Amino acid sequence: MRRVFFLLFAAAATVLVTLAFFTLPRSVHIEVGRLVIDTSGAAAVVLLLVLVVALYVVLRLITGIIGLPRRIRRWRRERLRLRGERAMTRAMVALAAGEAASARHESARARRALGDTPRTLLLAAQAARQAGQDDEATALYETLARHREASFLGLRGLFQQAVGRNDWEGAARLARRAEAAFPGAAWLRRERLAIALRRGAWSEALALAGPEMPRAALAAAAAAAEPDPAAALRLARRAFKDDPSLTAAALAYAERLRAAGKERAAQRALQVAWTANPHPDLAALALAPLTEPMARFRVAGVLTAGRADDAETHLLLARTALEAGLIGQARHHAEAARAHLSERRLFLLLADIAEREAEADEHGAGAAREVARTALRDAALAAPDPVWHCATCAAPLPAWRPVCPACGSLGQVVWGSPTRAATGGLLTTRQNLPPR
């Protein structure tokens, strides 16, 4: 349809031009000063067209001459741009190939051609870093960090340099600046978490940890390190609520409750923790305020009621019964524990019970002492006592830690025998930390 309308319009224009041509006057008289021109109408039209074309050509020549310097500058800029792009490509290839000297040379050429743009600065900084020129790389990264739109790139480079020289405090400051420049970067969140774990900044690590991380372990560590009692209690309560079976969380919560004067609440928390995961440290904290042996035995019975048949329960009741002079009950619980485990601590306890039996019964002292000697021989051959250790690398530790200092595993420090403990013990998430 458009083509039809165009043809009709062209035909009409042709007709109008033809009619106008035939209606031109036969002669035209033109006077310009002393110049007099007499010609036909058609010749006058042709002359007018020639004058218009000549004027157009002259104007184009004038504008071309005026715009020639600008076109030369544009041509030179394009030439420099192409030269700089080629230099950048060669520099990137050299970086990938590990040719630090060539990369620095080409990146310098790119800067001369393109100026200090974010791309040229980043490329030059990486080339300097690969060449071992740390001061030069730092200066370039700092220049890049001052760029409004590309500051994150410079801050990331400075952060990586700080990590490389084990400057964890400086790395943490740079990570916070990078977070402000580019909020929510997944890479930055992981790096900030690793730095917080390395520095022992447990509260910061807890804030950065995702739901898949062992947050109870981090909250327990943060509570232990928190100087403010109210904040520490909140963190400990959070850790205990997230994982009552985590001994460190239960201990932190009970200790903070006791410090706040809430002894009954502390004892209830320890009972819940014992039911979830019996551990000698829970008993030690529960019995710490008591000195009278019978009172300790009664409190031990209340503490362990939720796991009455557990080996740890029988061991605790046997010890406290022996302290209270209840030798028969001590023997009963020790033998009950023997049905579940055969560790050195059990046989040493049996030897102590036999010695007390020998002291209490002069007639049966000989047999009792023989039982004690047998228990000591069994202790020498028994399985080792459980210890804190890393479920990932089996490194033994003197106390619970949120992060294994040997391999950097997060939430993998468990209680038990390293040779028999399952790798899926307390927590299963591992966080790789930067090298020491």
Image: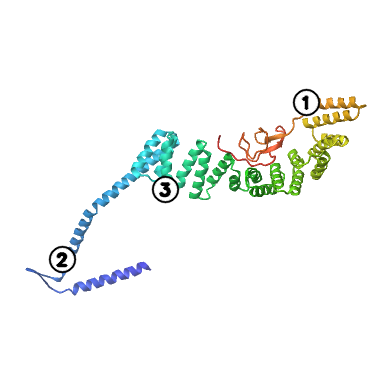
Q: How is the image coloured?
A: rainbow
The amino acid type of the residue labelled 3 equals His
The amino acid type of the residue labelled 1 equals Ala
- Vertical comparison of 269 with 58: above or below: above
Name the residue that disc number 3 marks: 147
In three-dimensional space, the C-alpha distance between marks 1 and 3, rounded to whole angstroms, equals 69 Å
Q: Is residue 212 left or right of residue 153?
A: right
Give the mark nearest the N terminus, 1 or 3. 3
Quarter-of-image position of residue 435? top right
- Per the image, label 3 sits on a secondary structure element best described as loop
Give the mark nearest the N terminus, 2 or 3. 2
Q: Is residue 83 left or right of residue 431?
A: left
Q: Is residue 307 left or right of residue 30?
A: right
The residue nearer to you, when weighing 90 against 175, is: 175
Q: Is the Cβ of the residue at disc 1 closer than 8 Å to that at disc 3? A: no
Give the mark nearest the N terminus, 1 or 2. 2
> What residue is drawn where x is 82% and y is 27%?
375
> What residue is drawn where x is 35% and y is 44%?
115
The amino acid type of the residue labelled 2 equals Leu
| Residue 380 visible in the displayed image | yes
Name the residue that disc number 1 marks: 380
Q: Residues within 10 Å of mark 2 (few under 14, many from 20)?
A: few
Q: Which mark is residue 47?
A: 2
Q: Which mark is residue 29?
A: none
